[in-house]
Every structure is written in structure tokens, then in C-alpha cells.
């Protein structure tokens, strides 16, 4: 495994599902992490789990890169069609979001007592708030620097899609909110990380996009266009921030989580047959790809979008 021990990451939308899987994998690999999300209680539980994993890396959730799915309850999914209901949030979301972030003010969460260089104590800290709130972004980055003294990786995982249907039928305010969270917030997080550490010391950024951003998608137009913008933003920033900062993205297809159950429940076998690898994704599929892009093994990789779809886009089954 590449030497990443002691490096520090901020992972947004990391209280559950794909974001939590990414944070867990990073902790298992030796990273320290600051996790963010909207709901303080869920985020506190995530930080507690991550700190437990840090004490016993081999005892955490298993990586499932092939075979049976093992997912965290309440995650999110990336998809080209269908809609899913956010648990406890009330937003109807076509799958493709890595986390819900539709409201809630910034709040401190237990698990932030580490000092720089403090070993495995508080390997993970948590800061709750809205992903598109500049004050929350600044607070999370400031607390990361106070706890660990550095910030080597930013994972922009939060994404939303509260509306579904043809673009001309959608509420313009909803479309604006999608872009604020899925695109502008990602840039805001990067500005904070750049000013705090990355600009002077270098590092990496990984944006969680979607295969919906690679081609038009019926019913998911606003979300798809926002993810296409995020993919192009990834390429643009890769050029502007080289050579010190590498910027890449991942673009998952359907990721099997409790949150996305409506997308496959009752027809998972038929849906899985559309995928050449014969199954839907699981959060650890995304986590492993992010861990690679964040590691020294990807030292000559920037401006790329790694498609994680079990071969779907090559099969003609979209």
C-alpha cells in the first residue's frame, strides 16, 4: 500500500453510504479525516465508527469489490433513472446523489479533540452543516487544520437532486439549488482547502460525479447537467492547479444501498443483467477508486474521470 499514513482528508457528505465508505477506506489506509454532512446525530455516529476502525483497521467494514453487496443502511446511489426518497429529509431525489444536503445550519459534532500529530486519537473529526454554506466550509477546513495541521485531500462527495422531470417543467429555484450544491459548493470547498494548505503544499482533489453527466438522461436533466459541469470543472481545475494539485473525478452508475432500494427492489436481478459484470455497485467500489486517485499510485493522473459502472456504458444497455 502506498505510504499515506498521517495524511489528512476532508470528505463531504460522509455520514452514510458512499461518503462514509470513502472515509472508512481512507482511515483504514492510514489517513486522518474530517467528515461533513447535514445531520449532526448521523455524522457523530459516523465519526465514532471511523475512530473505532482506526483502532482496528482489519476489523472495519469489508471491502466488497466483487461478489455479494455489503452496504451501509441509508446510503445514496448514482443512476441514470428512477427516483428515491430521502430518509427523514422529504426530498424526492433521482438516484445519483452521494448525500442529501438540503438544509440545516452548521453545528459542531463530538469527535474533534485531536491535536496535530496525536496518533490514532480522534482519527476522524466531524463538522455538521450545509455543504453549500461558505461559513460551514470555512469552519470545517479550519477545524481540520486545528486538529491535524494539514489538509492533503478534498473529496467533494455531496450531491443532490430534489426534482425529476423535463428541464422546462422544473422549478428554476430547484435547478439553481442543484447547481449550488453539486457544482458551486465543490468550488467553494476547494477555495477553502487551497487557502489553508493545498495552494502552498499541494495535494489532491476527487470529485464524485455520475455517469448521468456523460450523456443525456430522461428525467434527470438538471442533475445530469450539473454532473457534466462538475466533470468539466474537474478537467479545468486539473490544468489550472497543476503541477502541485491533482484533480480527478469518479462517475458511478447504480450503487446498491438501502437509500436506493426503490431503484432495484423487486427487479434487482433483471437490472443487474444489464451490467457486463453482473451486479450493481456497492459503496466500497467507489471508495476503492477514490483511495487510488488520492494515493501516490496515481501521482501521474490528473484531469480524469474514472467511470465506475460494471461495464454498463460499454454495453449499449443505457
Image: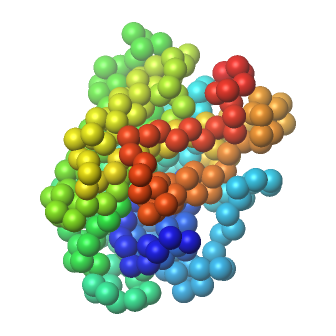
Residue under the image location 26 percent in, 48 percent down: 242
> Image check: 166 left or right of 202?
right
Q: Is residue 108 visible?
A: yes
Find residue 32 and report its horizontal and vertical position in percent: 40, 74
> Farthest front residue?
300
Q: Is residue 73 above or below residue 253?
A: below
Say how the picture is coloured. Answer: rainbow
Between 34 and 66, the residue placed more toward the observer is 66
Image quarter for residue 197?
Answer: bottom left
Residue at 46% from the left image edge and 62% from the top image edge? 295
116, 300: nearer the viewer = 300
Q: Residue at x 52, y 20 (%)?
A: 215
In the displayed structure, would residue 12 be above or below residue 160?
below
Horizontal arrangement in the rendering, residue 186 relative to residue 165 (left or right): left
Please state if 270 lies on the left or on the right of 82 as rendered: right
286 and 222: which one is in front?
Answer: 286
Looking at the picture, how far across and down is residue 128, in whole percent? Answer: 34, 62
When the figure is inspected, residue 155 is found, relative to residue 253, above or below; the finding is below
Amino acid at each position: 500500500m502506498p505510504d499515506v499514513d498521517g495524511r489528512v482528508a476532508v470528505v463531504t457528505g460522509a455520514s452514510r453510504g458512499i461518503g462514509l465508505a470513502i472515509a472508512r477506506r481512507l482511515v483504514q489506509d492510514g489517513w486522518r479525516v474530517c467528515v461533513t454532512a447535514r445531520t449532526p446525530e448521523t455524522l457523530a455516529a459516523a465519526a465514532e465508527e471511523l475512530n473505532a476502525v482506526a483502532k482496528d483497521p482489519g476489523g472495519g467494514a469489508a471491502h466488497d469489490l466483487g461478489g455479494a453487496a455489503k452496504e451501509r443502511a441509508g446510503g445514496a446511489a448514482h443512476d441514470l433513472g428512477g427516483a428515491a426518497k430521502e430518509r427523514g429529509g422529504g426530498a424526492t431525489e433521482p438516484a445519483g446523489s452521494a448525500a442529501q444536503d438540503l438544509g440545516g445550519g452548521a453545528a459542531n459534532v463530538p469527535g474533534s479533540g485531536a491535536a496535530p500529530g496525536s496518533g490514532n486519537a480522534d482519527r476522524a473529526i466531524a463538522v455538521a452543516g450545509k455543504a453549500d454554506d461558505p461559513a460551514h466550509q470555512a469552519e470545517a477546513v479550519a477545524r481540520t487544520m486545528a486538529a491535524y495541521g494539514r489538509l492533503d485531500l478534498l473529496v467533494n462527495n455531496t450531491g443532490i437532486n430534489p426534482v425529476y422531470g423535463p428541464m422546462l417543467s422544473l422549478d428554476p429555484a430547484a435547478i439553481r439549488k442543484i447547481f449550488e450544491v453539486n457544482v458551486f459548493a465543490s468550488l467553494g470547498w476547494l477555495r477553502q482547502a487551497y487557502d489553508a494548505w493545498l495552494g502552498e503544499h499541494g495535494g489532491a482533489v476527487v470529485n464524485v460525479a455520475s455517469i448521468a453527466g456523460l450523456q443525456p438522461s430522461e428525467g434527470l436533466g438538471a442533475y445530469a447537467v450539473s454532473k457534466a459541469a462538475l466533470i468539466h470543472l474537474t478537467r479545468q481545475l486539473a490544468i489550472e492547479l497543476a503541477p502541485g494539485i491533482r484533480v480527478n473525478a469518479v462517475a458511478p452508475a447504480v450503487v446498491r444501498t438501502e437509500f436506493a432500494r426503490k431503484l432495484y427492489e423487486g427487479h434487482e436481478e433483471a437490472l443487474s443483467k444489464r451490467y457486463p459484470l453482473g451486479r450493481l455497485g456497492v459503496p466500497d467500489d467507489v471508495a476503492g477508486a477514490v483511495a487510488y486517485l488520492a494515493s501516490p499510485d496515481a501521482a501521474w493522473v490528473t484531469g480524469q474521470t474514472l467511470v465506475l459502472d460494471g461495464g454498463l456504458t460499454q454495453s449499449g444497455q443505457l
